[in-house]
Amino acid sequence: MTTTLAVPPTESAAALRLRPWRPDDLPALVAAHRDPMLRQRLTTSLTDEAEARQWLAAQEAGWQSATRFSFAVLAEDDQTPLGHVGMKVVTADMAEVGYWTAAHARGRGIATRALETTSQWALHTQDLVRLTRLDLLHAENNPASCRVAEKCGYVLHDLLPPAPPAFPTSGHRHVRTPLGN
């Protein structure tokens, strides 16, 4: 299955396209994961092409099994990924969402626009599973992710204690439902 989502332009930003990751995205994926800030924020950091290939294969398998929906975020007129947004189905009606933006593309509202489009798709239009809740988890010391979550209608639900090794610091759980809470 191939799903492509369109993110309309704004007054200050060009349109974006969200599509499943492909093998030809490998160089951009590895380059993005070389960023120290991104490596610090993610629970899975890709250190070389072999790990990136495994990650790409897992994303494709997720689409096929309808358990993980992972999008490369691109400018409408470019094939080089600027970021990632995805969701992992946790229960029959709930998924966890996550995202990242490549270092050169941060600060332009890309994560917010991509997350909003994916959230709308997940809660209102996608037909593979019927989701009624999206959870977004991030480290407490990541105020940028908190702002993205809030801008996209994710409400702070609870504070999470550290859970090493994957989550060594406290975190936030934001929740969004079709009704907005």
Image (spheres, grey):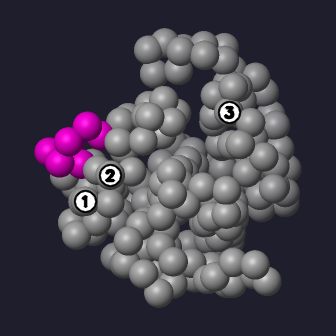
Residue 30 appears left or right of 143? left
Crowding around mark 2 (Cα neighbors within 10 Å: few <14, some 14 to 19, many 20+) is: some
Crowding around mark 1 (Cα neighbors within 10 Å: few <14, some 14 to 19, many 20+) is: some
Query: Mark 2 and mark 1 in contact (Cβ < 8 Å)?
Result: yes
Disc number at residue 31? Answer: 2
Q: CA distance from mark 1 to mark 2?
A: 6 Å
Res. 64 visible in picture: no
Q: Is residue 47 highlighted in magenta?
A: yes
Q: Amino acid at mark 2?
A: Ala
Q: Amino acid at mark 3?
A: Asn
Q: CA distance from mark 3 to mark 2?
A: 22 Å
Disc on the earlier residue, 1 or 3: 1
Q: Which residues are magenta?
A: 46-52
Disc on the earlier residue, 3 or 2: 2
**Viewer-side residue, 82 vs 125:** 82
SS for callout 1: helix
Quadrant including the N terminus: bottom left
Disc number at residue 83? Answer: none
Q: Position of residue 7 (x, y in %)?
A: 62, 79
Disc number at residue 142? Answer: 3
Q: Residue at x 68, y 43 (%)?
A: 145
Please give the residue where the numbered disc 1 appears in the rendered image: 27
Q: Is residue 22 highlighted in magenta?
A: no
Q: Amino acid at mark 1?
A: Pro
Q: Residue at x 32, y 52 (%)?
A: 31
